[in-house]
Image (cartoon, grey):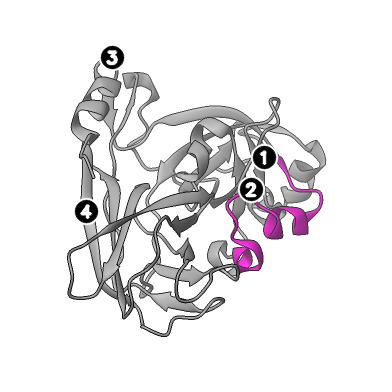
Amino acid sequence: MPFFFPLLFLSLLSAATACDRCVHQAKAAFYQDEAAGAYRGACGYGDLTPALANGYFSAIMPPLYKYGAGCGACFQVRCKNDKICTKEGTKIVVTDRNDNTYTGLVLSQKAFGEMAVSGKDGLLMSYGVVDVEFKRIPCEYKNQNLLIRVEEWSQYPSYLAIKLLYQGGQTEIVGMDIAQVGYSNWDYMGRNYGAVWETKKPLPKGPLQLRFVVTSGYDGKWIWAKYVLPADWRPGLIYDTGVQIYDIAKEGCPTEQCGDGQWRRR
């Protein structure tokens, strides 16, 4: 797989300042039908969403959804009405794409209400749509490795579709290869949609290993999961990769848009 990250990333930063995270401005609403956001999100997490995000999930605008690469990303969001909103705001996990051109984010009701100061959550919810600012933050899952779930439509032993769960750090997985354990004949996997990846060639027999290309620092890096799937893997089951991601990918934006400082409660 060609390694193109340094040139691409440096070209994006040429007219901008590199910082750990950029602050974005948008309007935010909340899901009126909570189940629609939790179980039908474009990332494909389905009924795993509540546990994955602990109820703090969100749809995000297409430029940050990034054709699915933004799935699982964590953001800190706060509304801009100082009279009823905290400085810290709330933290969310991206589980869906928001195609509404009026709002940039659609939060879970739990996340939306948590932006308010104590006792003002009902008032904030009554507004329906509020102005917010938000920034990327590292996802932290204590004592939890990156997991993969084998999708139901996988066809053992020849075709595999997997969903990534509990992706840590402040990165994006932009490439994935698969091979039999103990061999170096790697085959490319492609993104099917959202957080779901699929094989493009018939699978080798035996236990399987994965390697991921993740954005990190100013370019990218490989992360190798040496033993992920047993030889008798099955659709519907979840497997532990034995690795976790802790890297932070730099972002490029004007100096005044950098948000590396902490947002804390008043």
Q: Residues within 10 Å of mark 1 (few under 14, many from 20)?
A: some
Label 4, label 2: how far apart the Cα atoms are:
42 Å
Label 4, label 1: how far apart the Cα atoms are:
44 Å
Q: Mark 3 or 1 closer to N-term?
A: 3
Question: Which one is in front, 163 or 216?
Answer: 163
> What label sits on residue 222 in the rendered view?
4
Contact (Cβ within 8 Å) of mark 2 with mark 1: yes
Q: Is residue 60 magenta?
A: no
Residue at numbered disc 3: 15
Q: Amino acid at mark 4?
A: Trp
Locate residue 113, reporting x and y percent. 69, 50
Label 3, label 4: how far apart the Cα atoms are:
27 Å
Q: Mark 3 or 4 closer to N-term?
A: 3
Q: Secondary structure at mark 4?
A: strand
Label 2, label 1: how far apart the Cα atoms are:
6 Å
Q: Amino acid at mark 3?
A: Ala
Contact (Cβ within 8 Å) of mark 3 with mark 4: no
> What label sits on residue 84 in the rendered view?
1
Q: Secondary structure at mark 2?
A: loop
User: Vertically, is 154 above or below 113?
Assistant: below
Q: Amino acid at mark 1?
A: Ile
Q: Is residue 266 visible?
A: no
Locate residue 82, reporting x and y percent. 61, 33
Residue at numbered disc 2: 117
Quick one: quadrant of the N terminus? top left
- Horizontal relation, residue 255 to residue 181: left or right: right
